[in-house]
Image (cartoon, rainbow, N blue to C red):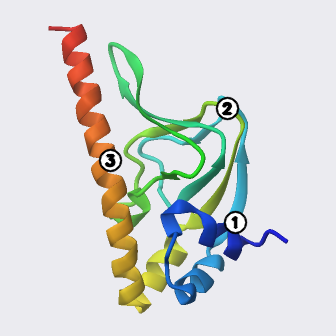
Amino acid sequence: METLERILAEHPFFKGMDQRYLELLTGCASNVRFEAGEYIFRAEEEANQFYLIRQGKVALEAFAPERGPIVILTLDQGEVLGWSWLFPPHRWRFDAQAVEFTRAIALDGACLRKKTEDNHDMGYEFMKRFSQLMARALLATRLQLLNVYELNP
């Protein structure tokens, strides 16, 4: 049987995480789904979760007034969407749109902030994992900016 705890344990983001932490995380998790074209979140909305993508594709977009939405990064199965729940003021910085039908696990940010505050070892483990995601997103943003510059010298 496929349980949330098992799904979390098998997701690449949580691979190798201590079983005690996975048990705590399960109480913060729920299954969600998004249709193609549906916005998962919009920039400046309150950020209270992050998502483990189980199936589908999600485009992370920035809006440029003269160009419209610019895809910064496309996320696939096995990847993680969102870290704005970690840092005040807990607002999304980008838009996220399902490119195709997408299934994910949503993890409640308020629940996780409380659990990581109560368990600093678990919090440290989260920060190590999320810092890798942030570094990847910053690199993707840099590459996108270089591409924009090349198109508009």
- Vertically, is 15 above or below 72? below
Q: Residue furthest right?
A: 1
For label 3, the crowd category at 10 Å Cα-Cα, with few meaning under 14, some 14 to 19 and many 20 or more, is: few
Which residue appears at 61% of the width and 72% of the height?
9
| Dot in front, 3 or 2 | 3
Q: Secondary structure at mark 2?
A: loop
Percent x, y of residue 103: 70, 48
Query: Looking at the image, which is closer to me, 153 or 41?
Result: 153
Q: Which of the 4 image quadrants contains residue 86?
A: bottom left
For label 1, the crowd category at 10 Å Cα-Cα, with few meaning under 14, some 14 to 19 and many 20 or more, is: few
Which residue appears at 26% of the width and 19% of the height?
147
Percent x, y of residue 16: 49, 75
Measured Cα–Cα span from mark 2 to mark 1: 20 Å
Quadrant where the N terminus sits is bottom right
Q: Secondary structure at mark 3?
A: helix
Q: Amino acid at mark 1?
A: Ser
Q: Amino acid at mark 2?
A: Glu
Q: Amino acid at mark 3?
A: Arg
Marked residue nearer the N-terminal end (3 or 1): 1
**Residue to which mark 3 is pinned:** 136
For label 2, the crowd category at 10 Å Cα-Cα, with few meaning under 14, some 14 to 19 and many 20 or more, is: some
**Residue to which mark 2 is pinned:** 100
**Residue to which mark 1 is pinned:** 30
Percent x, y of residue 102: 68, 42
Which residue appears at 31% of the width and 37% of the height?
140
Quadrant where the C terminus sits is top left
Percent x, y of residue 57: 60, 37
| Dot in front, 2 or 1 | 2
Q: Which of the 4 image quadrants contains residue 90?
A: bottom left
Marked residue nearer the N-terminal end (2 or 1): 1
Marked residue nearer the N-terminal end (3 or 2): 2
Please say if the residues under marks 2 and 1 sit with CB atoms less than 8 Å apart.
no
